[in-house]
Amino acid sequence: MLLPNPSEHTTRDRRSTLLKAALGLLSFLLLDTRLTHSRLKRKERLYKNLFESATEATCLIDYHYKTILDCNPYFERLTGYARNELFNLSVLELVPEGDHPRLSQLCQEVSDKGTIHDVTGIRLKKKNGSIVSVAFSISVINMDEEKMIQVIIKDISAEEQQRRYLNDLETLNRITFEITSQLEIDELMPKLAEHTVDLAGGDGGFVSLVDKDMGEIINKYAYNLLEPVYENCIPLVAEAVRKKHTLVINDYPALPQALKDVVNEGVKTALLVPVLVDNEVRAVISVFGFSYKKKFDDYHKNLLEAVARQTSASIEHAMLHKQLNAALNTSNLLLQAANIIGRSLDINETLRELVNIAVRTTGLDHSNIGLYDAEHDEMVIAVSYENAIPAGLRFKLTDFPEASKIKSGTWFIANIDDPRLSPQFKELMRTTNVKSALYSPLMYARRPIGVMCVGSTGRMIMFEERQIEIARGIASQATIAVQNAILYTQTKTELEKERYIAEELQRSLLPQELPEIPHTDLGAYYASSTEEAQVGGDFYDIIALPGNRYAMVIGDVSGKGIEAAASTAMVKCTIRTFLYQYPSPSFALSQANTSLSRQLEQGIFVTVFCIVYDVDTGLVTYANAGHPHPCYFDKGKGHCVQLASSDPAICLLPNYSYHDHTTTLPPDGFMVTFTDGTIEARKDDEFFGEKRLKRVIDISAGLAAQDIADSIIEECFTFAQGRLDDDIAILVIKRLSR
């Protein structure tokens, strides 16, 4: 029996093993291929699910031909196209022609970088032709070994609208600043015309002034308009004047009442906004579009109406500016009146100068002052303007029923043909040669000491509020002058005489009583220094302003005695004048600084804290000219803090511009303002100081405003053992809970 060859057997086994291994490898490769294909399919399904469910507009674009291959539902909604309409649509067809160069640039950047994010500057054109602002994120991806471009698009129209709104708001604020800082009409109006055209996006426009009495258009300030255009558009302006409200016209040629001349000038759209002052049209802002692309809507209307409201105030300010020199002249004359009282105690000389000032400041032609002889119940003429009435002429008060008003301290106006006047009083007016007169009793300690008359000799007149205020102010000065003269003979030393006069003058500058302000509690206290010291220049003032607002001023004029008191009168009057002109603390202090730097003697300076308080909102706008920082108490915080600021005193830097700050008084919150005598009250070498002041305020926080002021004064007197080296003025404003 033959045995098998061992080498042949080995060879067959090796071949079998190799064949099995090859079959095994082939099976593994086939299995791996199936697994890889399965994974790719799963990845593709996952990508498509993500693609379909994306919350932003997404599309796939052919890498080479830039046509749309696929998109999700959000992309359909954003473009307005159905999905099948978008297939094979070129991306160029979805972009405005003007943005094509930028799109080509982006495609190159994607090819170089592979991915770019949050690209703006290219807009999307929707199926209906409208244009949408968008942001792109673009990536190159591989799908089944093919390159594609994935684009994610975000609609940023709302963001663009918000950005536009903020830009317009910034422009509006700039316009507001410019027009409110102009006091000359011819400088204000050309700027206004330019800014309103730009703000509304018009092609041109002009601003027209309207005569208050005649209702006629008197001046026109044009921007980017030829004269024939705005001359022919005057009938449109007249329509806005007649209707007193804004006109928005987006197809002027289609109007039945369209004027041929206006249409011929190319006017397609118009926006006309009247500027009202006291419900009368004083100007009209007109903006025009010369193509139908320039459409005006409520947004533009609201913008220009906001400008018109500011313009209204600016026109009023410009008109007031014309009266400012007269007001400053009056201020100087009133300062003279204050100086007269301190300069001489010769009663006749003082009263003669006062009647001269009364005539000059009121613009009338007669004034006289009579002194009351209580023993005989007679009024005796002391002085008259240009000696029109003999001095010493006497009138028995019992002969005139109107004498009861004089004795009670009630001022009144009399016209010689008024049937309500007694025949005796009409005879008195004939004797003193006046047709219309304002009679202001001079009262001291509720007793009559005289009467001042200011009037017209040539004809009967209607007294202006300004004339009444000035005349009564000078009458107050005359009261002090008369009383000073009476008490002069009773004083013992020159120091006592000067101190008394200065103190009385200083007190006359303070409000006789605090006004009643809705939902607000006020408290005030003025304490003069003790007898060894001289009276200073401390003062406070409260002024009612339009719009349910009040200005409150507290200040301290450097120096002592009569001179400081006289300067205080001028400072108070000047600040009042500028607050009436424009109710901004920084404006009033800046203008007063410029004016007073020229008028007060060199070396005099004034610290002032000024606020404008809005009763409705509790908003407090304040400016500080080197004055002690006021204390602000917020009930929610439980303690007071100081409102710090760093502007210098008035008259130190003549051209300095002061700054406004704001805070809000919450219900039961209050502010304490004071002069430096409060914290500088002294005991030996120790000052009362800010810490003690804050402690008193915190302890007194639950009290009424007047009680808070009284508590502070009481603590100062106690600490200083009843001796004050300086005057103290305190003003407290507290907002009440409604």
Image: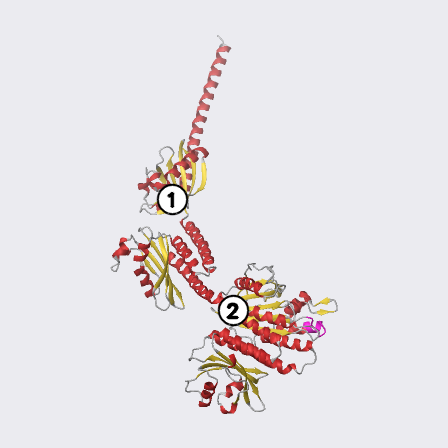
- The picture places residue 707, in percent across and down from the top left corner, at 61, 74
- The picture places residue 620, in percent across and down from the top left corner, at 54, 65
Secondary structure beneath dot 1 equals: strand
Q: Is residue 717 magenta?
A: yes
Q: Is residue 616 visible?
A: no
Which residue is the extreme one toward the right? 684
Label of residue 513 in the image: none
Q: Amino acid at mark 2?
A: Asn
Q: Amino acid at mark 1?
A: Arg
Q: Is residue 647 magenta?
A: no
Q: Going by the image, does 531 lie left or right of 652? A: right
Q: Going by the image, does 5 lie left or right of 92? A: right
- For disc 2, the marked residue is 329
Q: 380 above or below 516?
A: below
Specify which label sits upstream in the sequence, 2 or 1: 1
Density class for disc 2 (Cα within 10 Å; few <14, some 14-19, many ≥20) is few
Q: Which residues are magenta?
A: 715-725
Q: Nearest to the eye among marks 2 and 1: give it.
A: 2
139 or 105: which is nearer to us?
Answer: 105
Residue 334: quarter of image: bottom right
Disc 2 and disc 1: Cα gap in Å? 63 Å
Q: How many marks?
A: 2
Label of residue 123 in the image: 1
525 or 563: which is nearer to us?
Answer: 563
Q: Is residue 327 visible?
A: yes
Q: Going by the image, does 575 lie left or right of 435? A: right
